[in-house]
Image: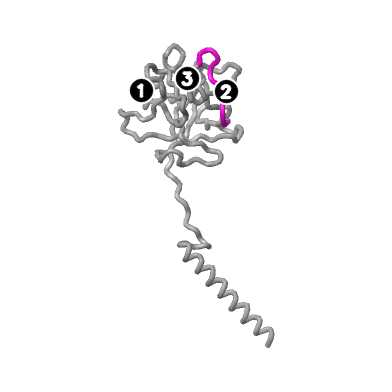
């Protein structure tokens, strides 16, 4: 009799506990057992990003770009080395950012360089009006927000040591003793700050 009584009491407690959990779930407007998944924002990739041998900046080199402008004599960027493919979205600024991904990187339609949009020192080599610009009034495409991976070392198929220049806001390769050409400082070149970014290689 005691054994049967214990079984019945345990079953009753289980039913009560389950009812409490379901009640809490309903009060919270969802299920504690199977929460609804959070949909990620749509993302795409952009190929054709190159290292400029003159200024060391990362710039877009493909048929969608009308021209590029390098600090070296205001001529065009000169590509060298590997080709990189970057991920982007067209969401609101900051969407897609995480602990190892920084959002708000933009493509300057005036000089083709990649730069960090929120910076207060967006120096573009195209003068006058020397700020980088990403809102191209002549483009039929929505503005792109690039998502850069940082502080992960150098995984296979990636290249790190890409840095933010706090003087011109462009992304440049900081793997050489010489620091390239910065449109804000032609004497000492770029000056790095912040994260160590890694770029995925699409072609060697």
Query: Hey, which residue is sitting farthest front in the picture?
Result: 120
Marks 3, 2: nearer the viewer: 2
24 versus 1 height, above or below: above
How crowded pointer 2 is (Cα within 10 Å; few <14, some 14-19, many 20+) is rated as many
First in residue order: circle 3 vs circle 1: 1
Marks 3, 1: nearer the viewer: 1
First in residue order: circle 3 vs circle 2: 3
Task: Please provide the residue range marked out in magenta.
Answer: 185-195
Check disc 3 and report the residue beneath it.
Answer: 79
Give the residue drawn at x 61%, y 17%: 177
Q: Residue 41's spot in the image, x, y percent? A: 43, 44
Residue 193 quadrant: top right
Which quadrant: the N terminus?
Answer: bottom right
First in residue order: circle 2 vs circle 1: 1
Check disc 2 and report the residue beneath it.
Answer: 174
Check disc 1 and report the residue beneath it.
Answer: 66
């Amino acid at each position: 009799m005691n054994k049967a009584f214990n079984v019945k009491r345990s079953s009753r407690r289980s039913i009560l506990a389950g009812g409490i959990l379901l009640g809490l779930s309903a009060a919270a407007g969802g299920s504690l057992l199977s929460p609804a998944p959070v949909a990620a924002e749509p993302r795409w990739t952009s190929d054709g990003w190159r290292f400029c041998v003159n200024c060391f900046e990362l710039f877009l080199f493909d048929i969608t770009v009308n021209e590029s402008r390098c600090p070296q004599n205001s001529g065009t960027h000169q590509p060298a080395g590997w080709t990189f493919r970057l991920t982007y979205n067209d969401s609101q600024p900051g969407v897609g950012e995480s602990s190892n991904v920084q959002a708000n990187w933009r493509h300057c339609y005036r000089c083709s360089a990649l730069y960090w949009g929120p910076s207060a020192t967006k120096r573009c080599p195209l003068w006058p009006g020397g700020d980088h610009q990403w809102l191209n009034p002549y483009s039929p495409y929505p503005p792109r927000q690039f998502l850069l991976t940082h502080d992960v070392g150098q995984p296979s198929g990636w290249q790190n040591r890409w840095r933010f220049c706090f003087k011109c806001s462009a992304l440049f390769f900081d793997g050489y003793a010489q620091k390239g050409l910065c449109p804000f400082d032609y004497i000492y070149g770029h000056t790095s700050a912040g994260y160590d970014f890694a770029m995925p290689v699409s072609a060697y």
